[in-house]
């Protein structure tokens, strides 16, 4: 009973109610269109990419850093995978190469932040333009089609007729990272690094090493997300996952992962991901112009951060009372 | 003599040498690079980034940043073009665009000061909103601004060499350079960037100054967009997508630290010159435009690395001075004690 009570008072409960309200609102507005099975499948498919990005961006934000280059990394890696496939490399080789390239860019981000002391957002802004440009150079700005049957299976096949295969990847990833963050020493040290880096160092942790790990992890996940999108569309194009990157950030913030670092988790992030995916899908179903959708996603990001600020302010106030 | 030494000892010299070397390199690669027409083009290109950079530089010195300034420039141009199409005389349209830019700045300032969101993340969200709104308003097509007297704002040249936009930018840099170094207000900007708490304890209101800087930045960005519109005869929705990152790169190259509190307009000017020459040179050598995107990121990393090593050297110098001071202090105390003992 008390467990239910504490849940109802938590932030996740508010988010859950918000999600349900959102789903109902769009269902009414679209005349039930959003609740059709085919559309639910669409939502599930879009969730895969956003959740991989959310995990990468979210774990970094818990440690007090940010990565804005995830879109660029994913887009470039998808190109690399598609080009390798075209040149006769087997599917696992192409996938592995793409993820390795993503991890390498993550390593560069970590180097810039750890060793050269750049602020992470400006360092990753720079790597964004480098990775985007490299992607263009590889392909001359043209899309690269994918014909590999395994990629086609990963991106477009359904299990039991309804559940897209790619969703399994997202679910496994979310569970693994939730366990990693909550139950392992490494996970707890991520929170400590984000909450108070000096204290973490004094406690014998190596914040730099942890940050390297997280940046590399985010890069690899972004590469995976980019490759998955390409395998769904059967083409690697220059737009890639650049627009999903902000979706990843927004979902993480919505889910209670604060910019200051040290708070939040995968549970909230999952609700954030669903809110975002339903929101985006709903706007398309209600026939809102794509440009207005850009406006709305920006506004949602701002609203999420503002909410984050208000809740931390309230927390601080209650701490003062105690 | 001392003054000369200071100039040669500073980082400006290295920057000037690099800029000259880059110019020479592109001149060797393509002999038309320094032809009069191309130099005019260069000055025009410099003026757009430069005008945005002036506002951005002030923000960076105060320890803030505006990632939406490219979008604000673009929006300013669009607003101006729409006003002209509605039959408003162009000076009024210009003022409308400037006021609009100021309002954009106020929005940024609201989120930074009142909602306490970090500048870079709220302006990132705002950038997305503006980019969407610009496309809604223009339907993703360039808006023509047919008004020959307005075009003169972009096409007039002074003394046959200097395009008016370039002259405007230089004027702005001189004026803001003087404000930064000679006025009370300018010095408080440095103080806020260097140590905000100390500034508050000195009786400065950082929030008010940051609001002023954001408003100023929005107006300058809008001005840049209006001049670009006058030069191109239309306002294109994708015109200024890289404006903000170019401006940040130029400012940081010019010695304005990302952490706030240091730098000035002189270095800024050379920084702008360097990045514009670089990207124009890449075009002149016939490389595909994608290389420019890569080069942009690479230059930014380079600029930040230089900034990092500079600040490290500065810190080391300060530490060395501190050690020296302490040693002197210690020695004087030791001799004092000696005297006391002999007494």
Image: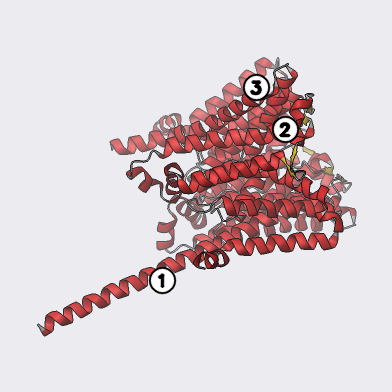
Q: Secondary structure at mark 3?
A: helix
* Direction from residue B136 to residue B253 in the image, left or right: left
Q: Residues within 10 Å of mark 3 (few under 14, many from 20)?
A: few
- Nearest-to-viewer mark from 1 and 3: 3
Vertical side of A125 occupied by B115: above or below: above
Q: Which mark is residue B153?
A: 2
* Identity of the residue furthest to the bottom in this view: B342
Instruction: Locate the N terminus of chain A and report the quarter of the image it occupies.
Output: top left
* Identity of the residue furthest to the front in this view: B159
For image coordinates 71% across by 48% down, the residue present is A72
Q: Residue B294 at what x, y percent from top left?
A: 74, 53
Using the image as rendered, state which of residue B240 and residue B52 is in the foreground.
B52
Using the image as rendered, state which of residue B135 and residue A8 is in the foreground.
B135
Which residue is identified by label 3?
Answer: B92
Q: Do the residues at pointers 1 and 3 share their chain?
A: yes
Vertical side of B311 occupied by B83: above or below: above
Label 2: chain letter: B
Q: Secondary structure at mark 1?
A: helix
Rounded to the nearest whole Å, what is the CA distance between mark 1 and mark 2?
53 Å
**Which badge, 2 or 3, is on the more N-terminal residue?**
3
């Amino acid at each position: 009973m008390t467990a239910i009570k504490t849940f109802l008072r938590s932030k996740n409960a508010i988010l859950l109610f918000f999600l349900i309200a959102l789903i109902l609102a769009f269902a009414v507005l679209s005349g039930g269109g959003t609740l059709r099975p085919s559309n639910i499948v669409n939502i599930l498919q879009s969730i895969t990419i956003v959740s991989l990005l959310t995990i990468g961006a979210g774990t970094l934000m818990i440690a007090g850093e940010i990565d804005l280059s995830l879109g660029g990394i994913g887009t470039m890696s998808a190109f690399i995978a598609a080009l390798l496939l075209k040149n006769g490399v087997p599917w696992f080789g192409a996938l592995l190469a793409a993820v390795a390239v993503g991890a390498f860019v993550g390593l560069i981000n970590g180097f810039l932040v750890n060793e050269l002391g750049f602020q992470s957002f400006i360092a990753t802004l720079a790597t964004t333009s480098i990775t985007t440009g490299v992607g263009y150079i590889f392909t001359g700005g043209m899309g690269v089609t994918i014909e590999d049957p395994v990629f086609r299976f990963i991106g477009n096949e359904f299990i039991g007729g309804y559940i897209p295969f790619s969703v399994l990847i997202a679910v496994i990833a979310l569970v693994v990272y939730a366990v990693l963050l909550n139950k392992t020493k490494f996970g707890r040290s991520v929170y400590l690094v984000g909450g108070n880096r000096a204290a973490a160092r004094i406690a014998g942790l190596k914040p730099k090493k942890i940050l390297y790990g997280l940046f590399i992890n985010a890069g690899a996940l972004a590469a995976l997300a980019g490759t998955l999108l390409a395998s769904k569309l059967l083409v690697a194009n220059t737009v890639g996952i650049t627009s999903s990157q902000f979706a990843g950030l927004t979902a993480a913030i919505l889910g209670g992962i604060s910019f200051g670092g040290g708070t939040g988790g995968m549970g909230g992030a999952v609700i954030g991901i669903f809110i975002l995916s339903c929101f985006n899908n709903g706007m398309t179903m209600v026939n809102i112009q794509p440009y207005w959708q850009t406006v709305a996603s920006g506004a949602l990001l701002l609203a999420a951060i503002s909410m984050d600020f208000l809740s931390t302010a309230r927390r601080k106030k209650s701490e003062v009372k105690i | 003599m001392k003054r000369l030494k200071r100039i040669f000892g500073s980082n400006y010299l290295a920057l000037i040498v690099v800029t000259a070397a880059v110019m020479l390199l592109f001149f060797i690669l393509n002999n038309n690079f320094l032809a009069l027409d191309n130099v005019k083009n260069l000055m025009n290109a410099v003026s757009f980034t430069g005008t945005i950079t002036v506002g951005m530089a002030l923000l960076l010195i105060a320890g803030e940043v505006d990632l939406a300034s490219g979008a604000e420039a673009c929006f300013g141009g669009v607003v101006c073009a729409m006003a002209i199409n509605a039959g408003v005389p162009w000076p009024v349209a210009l003022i409308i665009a400037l006021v609009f830019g100021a309002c954009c700045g106020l929005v940024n300032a609201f989120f930074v000061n009142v909602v306490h969101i970090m500048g870079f993340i709220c302006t990132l969200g705002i950038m997305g909103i503006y980019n969407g709104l610009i496309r809604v308003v223009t339907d993703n097509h360039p808006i023509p601004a047919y008004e020959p007297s307005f075009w003169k704002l972009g096409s007039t040249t002074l003394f046959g060499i200097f395009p008016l936009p370039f002259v405007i930018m230089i004027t702005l840099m001189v004026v803001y350079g003087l404000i930064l170094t000679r006025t009370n207000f300018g010095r408080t900007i440095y103080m806020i960037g260097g140590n905000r708490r100390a500034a508050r304890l000195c009786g400065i209101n950082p929030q008010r100054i940051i609001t002023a800087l954001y408003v100023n930045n929005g107006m300058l960005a809008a001005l840049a967009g209006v001049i670009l519109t006058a030069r191109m005869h239309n306002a294109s929705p994708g015109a200024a997508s890289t404006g903000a990152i170019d401006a940040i790169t130029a400012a940081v190259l010019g010695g304005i630290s990302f952490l706030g509190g240091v730098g000035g307009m002189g270095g800024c000017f050379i920084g702008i010159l360097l990045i514009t020459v670089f990207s124009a040179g890449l075009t002149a050598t016939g490389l595909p435009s994608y290389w420019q995107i890569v080069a942009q990121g690479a230059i930014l990393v380079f600029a930040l690395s230089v900034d990092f090593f500079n600040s490290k050297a500065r810190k080391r110098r300060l530490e060395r001075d501190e050690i020296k001071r302490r040693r002197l202090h210690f020695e004087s105390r030791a001799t004092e004690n000696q005297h006391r003992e002999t007494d």
